[in-house]
Structure formats: structure tokens, C-alpha cells
């Protein structure tokens, strides 16, 4: 008998748990994330939950990775060859305006005082940075590697700040104006023909 159905069931259960964890993270934040809430949101037994994840830190890190992978896939699918920088930044901006992105940022904030969480989050953050770097590479090739890295770091820092600011003041039109101004200034510092 093949292990295929068992493996498929395990993947389905893990996905259910991660989806439930993301829902809890969005609704209750990191401070309100408990094993019981994740179990309830996922609709799984306690045994299934602990079989896949041994601690809240493991669940939280896996949830952030799950969010990052989903967002990277979405960005990759939405961006086509020949898209302008404005279009690509607009796609990334829309992704960062979602509650799931802000929930992930809560984990980043918690990682400031939790070294184990910080260490666990770093590989996923690096993967997302690399993914975005590859997506933007054709648009910033003329800048050279160092200036391209500065551009991406600056863009991600700006988007994180806008996402946090939107918690108190949701102003999508102003955010687009800020991004447009930043892109204009950055482009003016690039290589001149």
C-alpha cells in the first residue's frame, strides 16, 4: 500500500493548521495566539496539532513562512515581463496592505525581545527578500548590485512602515503618493544615460 494518501493527508492537515494560525494571528495578534485558538481555528485535534508543531514558536514561524510564500507566489504570478517599476511596486504594496502582512509584522516586533523567535524568522525573511530581489532584478539591473540592494531594502522598509501606519490611519491614496515620490527620487539617483 502506498504512503501517498497518508502524505497527502499530512500536507492537508499542516495547511489547515497554518491557515488557522494565520487567522488567529490576524484576529488576536501574536500575544493572543494560543495552541487552543489555533487548534479551534484549524478544526483539528490536539494530537494532530502537536504532531505537526511542538510549540507556539514553531507554529508562529511556520505561519509567517506560509504567509511569505503565499505572498511571494502572488507577486510572482501578478508581475509579468515588461511590467513597469510602478506596476510591480503597486502589486507589492497591495500585498503589504493585507491583514496577514501586518500580522506577520507583529511577529517581527515580538522577535525583538525573543531571540529564539528572531533566529527562527530570519531564514523566511531572507527567502522573501531573495524572491523579491529576483522579481525586481530586471527593473533595477542598471543600478548595479549595491544600489539594487539599497533600493529593495529601502522599498521594503518603506512598505513595512506604511503597513504599520495604516493600522491607525488607512490612507491608500496617500500611500501611493508616497511610493510614487520615493520611486521618482530613487530613479533620479540611478545611472544617467
Image (tube, grey):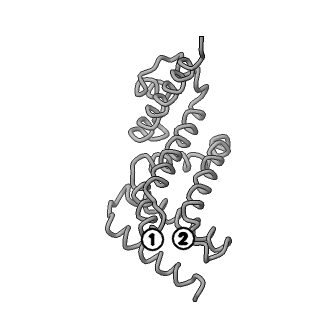
Residue at x 61%, y 77% (from the top left corner): 142
Asked if labels 2 and 1 touch by Cβ distance under 8 angstroms, the answer is yes
Residue 143 in the figure: left or right of residue 178: right
Q: CA distance from mark 1 to mark 2?
A: 8 Å
Residue at x 39%, y 48% (from the top left corner): 99
Q: Nearer the viewer, residue 141 or 28?
A: 141
Residue identifier under label 2: 139
For disc 2, the neighbor class at 10 Å (few under 14, some 14 to 19, many from 20) is some
Where, quadrant-wise, is the N terminus in this rendering? top right
Q: Position of residue 84 (x, y in %)?
A: 45, 71
Question: Residue at the top extreme?
Answer: 1
Instruction: Label 1, secondary structure: give it.
Output: loop
Q: Position of residue 168 (x, y in %)?
A: 36, 57
Q: Nearer the viewer, residue 82 or 51?
A: 82
For disc 1, the neighbor class at 10 Å (few under 14, some 14 to 19, many from 20) is few
Location of residue 68 with respect to 179 vertically, above or below = above
Q: Position of residue 136 (x, y in %)?
A: 55, 65
Q: Position of residue 12 (x, y in %)?
A: 49, 26
- Res 58 → quadrant: top right
Instruction: Label 2, secondary structure: give it.
Output: helix
**Residue 84: numbered disc:** 1
Location of residue 37 with respect to 3 vertically, above or below = below
Q: Nearer the viewer, residue 85 or 2?
A: 2
Residue 99 in the figure: left or right of residue 138: left
Amino acid at each position: 500500500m502506498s504512503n501517498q494518501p497518508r502524505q497527502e493527508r499530512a500536507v492537508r492537515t499542516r495547511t489547515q493548521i497554518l491557515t488557522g494560525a494565520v487567522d488567529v494571528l490576524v484576529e488576536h495578534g501574536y500575544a493572543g495566539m494560543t495552541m487552543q485558538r489555533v487548534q479551534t481555528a484549524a478544526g483539528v485535534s490536539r494530537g494532530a496539532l502537536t504532531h505537526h508543531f511542538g510549540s507556539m514558536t514553531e507554529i508562529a514561524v511556520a505561519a509567517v513562512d506560509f504567509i511569505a510564500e503565499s505572498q511571494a507566489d502572488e507577486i510572482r504570478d501578478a508581475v509579468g515581463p515588461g511590467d513597469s517599476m510602478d506596476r510591480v511596486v503597486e502589486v507589492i504594496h497591495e500585498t503589504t496592505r493585507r491583514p496577514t502582512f501586518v500580522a506577520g509584522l507583529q511577529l517581527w516586533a515580538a522577535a525583538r525581545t525573543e531571540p529564539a523567535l528572531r533566529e527562527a524568522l530570519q531564514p523566511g525573511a531572507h527567502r522573501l527578500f531573495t524572491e523579491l530581489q529576483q522579481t525586481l532584478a530586471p527593473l533595477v539591473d542598471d543600478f548595479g548590485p549595491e544600489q539594487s540592494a539599497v533600493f529593495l531594502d529601502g522599498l521594503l522598509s518603506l512598505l513595512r512602515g506604511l503597513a504599520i501606519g495604516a493600522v491607525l490611519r488607512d490612507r491608500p491614496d496617500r500611500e501611493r503618493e508616497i511610493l510614487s515620490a520615493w520611486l521618482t527620487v530613487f530613479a533620479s539617483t540611478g545611472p544617467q544615460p
